[in-house]
Image: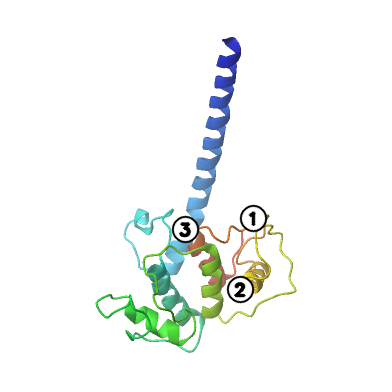
Amino acid sequence: MKKIISIFLSFIIISASSLYSVWATTAQQKDEFWENADFLAEKWIIKVSDKREWYRLHDNVTRWEMAKIVFGLFNTFNSDNIYFRCDESFFKDVTKDWGFCDYITPLVEKNVFKKADNFRIKDKLTRAEMVLILARALYIQPKLDYQTSFKDIDKNADYYGYLNAFVEKWWIKDSASFRPSANITRWEIFTVIARTLSGKWD
């Protein structure tokens, strides 16, 4: 019985320690997130929010949200500006009834998004998709000869060379795991985009 209680208490201590570590990291990350969110709002890449919680730190990013963000980024980063225009022939699920059509059409014309049957407006964006979309929007060339430490990426994948380029530029931190199929959070994408514009690194 004492042994069972001892094991149970050890589990509680370890769990509490892990939970503290998670919350401590989150607290440390929040300052950078708010700073990056404010920076992008000043650049009109994202909407200015009166309350910081409206930036939705841990929410995932949908494909239509990404289109709005990249529209502003494209015009901030590049000299060949794009303008609102809606072409309903590109995707079956993108029509004039949806306000984001004006963001998507010019980005398709610039090859940032690819034509397909459906845009999948409400699908959550993956980390690999983020790299591809940002690379096209920022005219980044792939770096096939650059080596990263990631153990979970496919060297034959279409995002591979662009991910290498992002790491070389310090826009994405090199580590053992990239998690290409994981959905990206607003905190993560705001951080990457802020780095593309400011070159800052932690």
User: Percent from the top left, x then y, of residue 18?
Assistant: 56, 36
The kind of residue on which mark 3 rests is Thr
Q: CA distance from mark 2 to mark 1?
A: 18 Å
Q: Are marks 2 and 1 in contact (CB under 8 Å)?
A: no
Residue 146 at x, y = what percent? 73, 71
Q: Is residue 100 left or right of residue 179?
A: left
Can residue 44 be seen here? The reply is no
Q: Quadrant of the N terminus?
A: top right
User: In the figure, is residue 80 to the left or right of 93?
Assistant: right
Nearer the observer, 158 or 173 = 158
Depth check, front residue: 30 or 177: 177
Point out the frontmost of discs 2 and 3: 2
Which sits in the foreground, 9 or 4?
4
Q: Where residue 185 is drawn, which disc sits there? A: 3
Q: Residues within 10 Å of mark 1 (few under 14, many from 20)?
A: few
Query: Which of 181/84 is in front?
Result: 181
Disc nearer the start of the sequence (2/3): 2
Count of numbered marks = 3
The residue identified by callout 2 is: 158
Point out the frontmost of discs 1 and 3. Answer: 1
Where residue 194 is drawn, which disc sits there?
none
Give how far across and how far down residue 115 sits, in percent.
44, 82
| Residue 188 shows in this picture | yes
What's the mark number on residue 177? 1
Residue lying farthest bottom? 80
Residue type at the position of mark 1: Ser
Which mark is first along the chain, 1 or 2? 2
Determine the secondary structure under disc 1.
loop
